[in-house]
Amino acid sequence: MSKVLVVDDDEALLRALRIGLTARGYEVSLARTGAEGVKQVSLVQPDVIVLDLGLPDMDGADVCRGVRRFSAVPILVLSAAANEERKVAALDLGADDYITKPFGMAELEARLRVALRRGGRAPDSSTELSVGDLDVDLVHHMASVAGHPLELTAKEFDLLAFLARHAGKVCTHHMILAGVWGPGYGSESQYLRVYAHRLRRKLGAHGAMLRTQPGVGYQLVADPA
Amino acid sequence: MASSLRRDLFGAGVALAAIAALSAVMVSDRRHVAVATAGLVLVLPVVAGVVLGGFLAGAVAVVAGFFAFDVLFIPPYDRLSVGRAANWVALVVYGIVMVIVARVVASLREAQTEAHRNDEVTRQLYRLSDALIARQGLAELLGVVAETIASTFGARWVTVLLPDGEALAQVASAGEAISEEERAALSPAAGRAESLSRSEGAELFTRVALSANGRPVGLVVLAGGALDAHNRDLLHTFANQAALAIERAQLQEQVLHGELLEEVDRWRRALMGAVSHDLRTPLASVKTAVSTLRRDDVELVAEDRGELLALIEEQSDRLARLVTNLLDMTRIEAGTLELRRETAAVADLVAEATLTLGASAGLSSLHTDLPGDLPLVDVDPLVMVQVLANLIDNALVHSPAGTRVEVTAATEGDHVRLAVRDHGPGVPEAEREGIFAMINRRSGAGRAGLGLTIAQTFTEAHGQHIELVSPPGGGASFEVTMALAPVPVEVG
C-alpha cells in the first residue's frame, strides 16, 4: 500500500482527498501547514507527496526545497492556473509534477502512478537508462526505441538523455537548458521547442512519451496513455 | 525715462544755484580773487551737477560756469570779451577741464548704475531659481513660474501655455483675469517655440518660448510690465531655467504615472489571483468528491459517501456565496449597485447570515449574544447579511476545534457596533494593517482574503467602518458599525 502525504490548508479538499485516495487503497496522512508537511515527511516516510502551493505559513516552493534537503520522495504540486510562476519555481526546486485545480480523481491517480514509478530515486546515474520502450546508452551515445536504433544528433541525444535521467519528472525549460546547453542558458526556450519537435518526430509512434507542459517544460513518461 | 529727466533738471538746478551763489560771494571782492582761483571754485558746481543730475546737467553747468567765469571774473568785467592772452588761456583750460570732469563723473555714475542693475538681475535670478528648485509637482511649478514672472516684471497678467495635442493650452496664469479677446489673441501656432517678440494689438504682449535641450516645452505670455533690454534678458534667462524645470517635472510625472500603472497592474493581477484561488478551491473539493463518487471500481462505505455528498453541498454553498459577493462588489465598485436601506433588526441580520452559511461546518460553535434592547439599524439588509456572513465564516475558519465564535453588539453614539470574535491564533501585528486588502490571505484558508475585502467594501458603501480589534486573551475580533435607524415620529 502506497503512502500519500497531502499538504493543503483547505479542510474540504483534505477531506475529499482523504476519502477518495483511501478508497483507492492509498494510506493517506494529512498536513495543514508547510512546516507540518516537512515534519510529516520524516515521520511517516510517504511514497509520494501531494502539495498545495498556497499554504498559509510558507510558499509551496520553499516546502519543496525543505523536503529536498533530506528526501527524494516524489512531489506532486497542486496549483491554481494563475500561479504559473510559482508552479515553475516549485518544479525548479524539486517538485516532480503538477496538477491544476480543479482536477478529477482519475487524473490525480494517473499522476500519482507516474510519480510512484519514478519512486524516491535520485536522478538515475547508471549508464544505461530505460524508460518504457526507450533505451538510452550513455556510454555509446546510442538510443533505441522498441529495439530500433534512433538516429540522433549530439544535442538531440543529450536532450533525450537528460529527460530519460529525470523520467517521470516535469523538467522546466530552465532546468533543461541549463542541464543540456550549459549554465549560460536558461531562457532560450525556442531552442527547446525545435529540438523537442525533432525528437518527437524521430520517436515516431512513441512520440507521445515526450509530453509538453505548456509554459512550463517537458516530461518523458514511460507509459503515455 | 521721466525720472532721469527729472534728475537732470534737479542736477542742473543745483549746479546753476551753486554757480550763482559762489559767483555772488566772489564777485563782491573780485579784484582780489585771482582768475585761476575763481576758475577752480567754479569747478565745484559742475561736479555737483554731474553727480546729482547726469551728463546733461553737467553740460548745462559747464556752459553756465563758462559764461559766469568769463563775464564776472575775467577782466574786462561784465562783458563777454576777454582781455589778456593769459585770461584766454584760463578760460579755455576751464572749459576743457569742465567737459572732461563732466564726462568722467558721468561715466563713473553710469558704471555704478550698471553694477547696481547687474546685482539686481543676479539677485532676481537667484530668487527665481530658488522658486524653481523648491517645487516638486508640475502644476505647482507652473503656478510658481507664472507668479514669479508676474511679480518680478510687474506684468498685468502672465500665462503659461503647454502643448496639448495639436495646440497650446493655458495651464497656469497669474495676475489679473485674462479677457476673452486677449485669450483669443494668444493662441499661437501649435508647439512652436517663438523668440521674444511683440505682437500687434491694443496692448503689447510679450511672448517667450520655453525650450529645454532644443525641444520646445511651452510658451509664456505676459501683458504690461516694464520690459527694457535688461528685463528682457532676465526674462530670457528665467524662461530657460523655467523650461528645464518644467521638463524635469514632466519627466518626473511620467515616471510616477508609469509606476502608478504598474501598481494598478500588480493589484489587478493580485485580485485575479485571489479570485482564481477562492473560486477554484471549493471547485477543487467538489470535483474531487464527485469524481470519487462516480467511480464504479471504488467501494465507498456509506459514511464516506455521506461525507462526500455533504462536502459537495457545503462547498457549492460556499461557491454560490462567493459568486454573489463578487458580483455585488463589482456592482458597488462600478457604481451600479444602489443600497436599498431599510430599518432592520440586528438579530434578524445575524440569523439570516447564519442561514446563508448553510451547511458550513462549525456553526454549532457560534454563540450569538445580543442585548434585547438593541436599537434598529439603517442598512441594506441583503448587503449587510453578506458582511456578517463573511465575518462569521472567517471566524469559524480560524477557530480551533472546540472553541467558540461569539457575536455581540452594543450601541455606541449614533451607531451599533457588532463584533465577531474568535479564539483562534489571532492576527500577527505585521498583518493587521493589510488584513482587508485584496491580496491578503489570513492564515488558515484562502477564502478569508476576499471575504474580508468584500466585507470592508460593503460596509464602507454604507458609510460605516469595519476594523480588526485584537482583544485581550487572544483571538481576533472583527467589528463593524451600523447606523441607527431614524426614530419614527409618533402619530396620534
Image (cartoon, coloured by chain):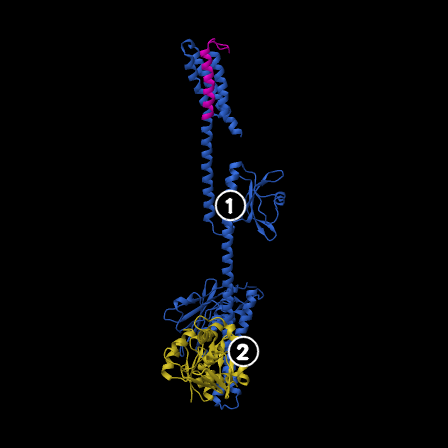
Chain colours: A yellow, B blue
Q: Quadrant of the C terminus of chain B?
A: bottom right
Q: Residue A197 has which mark?
A: 2
Residue kind at label 1, given as amino acid type: Asn
Report the chain holding disc 1: B
Element assignment for label 1 = helix
Residue B188, relative to residue B350: is it above or below? Answer: above
Q: Magenta span has B452?
A: no
Give the x, y percent position of residue B433.
43, 65
Amino acid, disc 2 = His
Using the rendered image of the protein, determine whether residue B444 is visible from the camera's viewpoint: no
Q: Quadrant of residue B410?
A: bottom left
* Residue numbers of the magenta segment: B75-104
Q: Is residue A139 visible?
A: yes
Residue shown at 39%/73% (left/top)? B425
* Numbered disc in front, either 1 or 2: 2
Q: Nearer the viewer, residue A187 or B226?
A: A187
User: Residue A221 appears at what percent x and percent y?
Assistant: 49, 83
Q: Tell me the crowding category of disc 2: few under 14, some 14 to 19, or many 20 or more residues within 10 angstroms, Cα based.
A: few
- In the picture of the structure, the residue carrying the numbered disc 1 is B240
Q: Quadrant of residue B341?
A: bottom right
Check the image and report above or below for A167 versus B86.
Answer: below
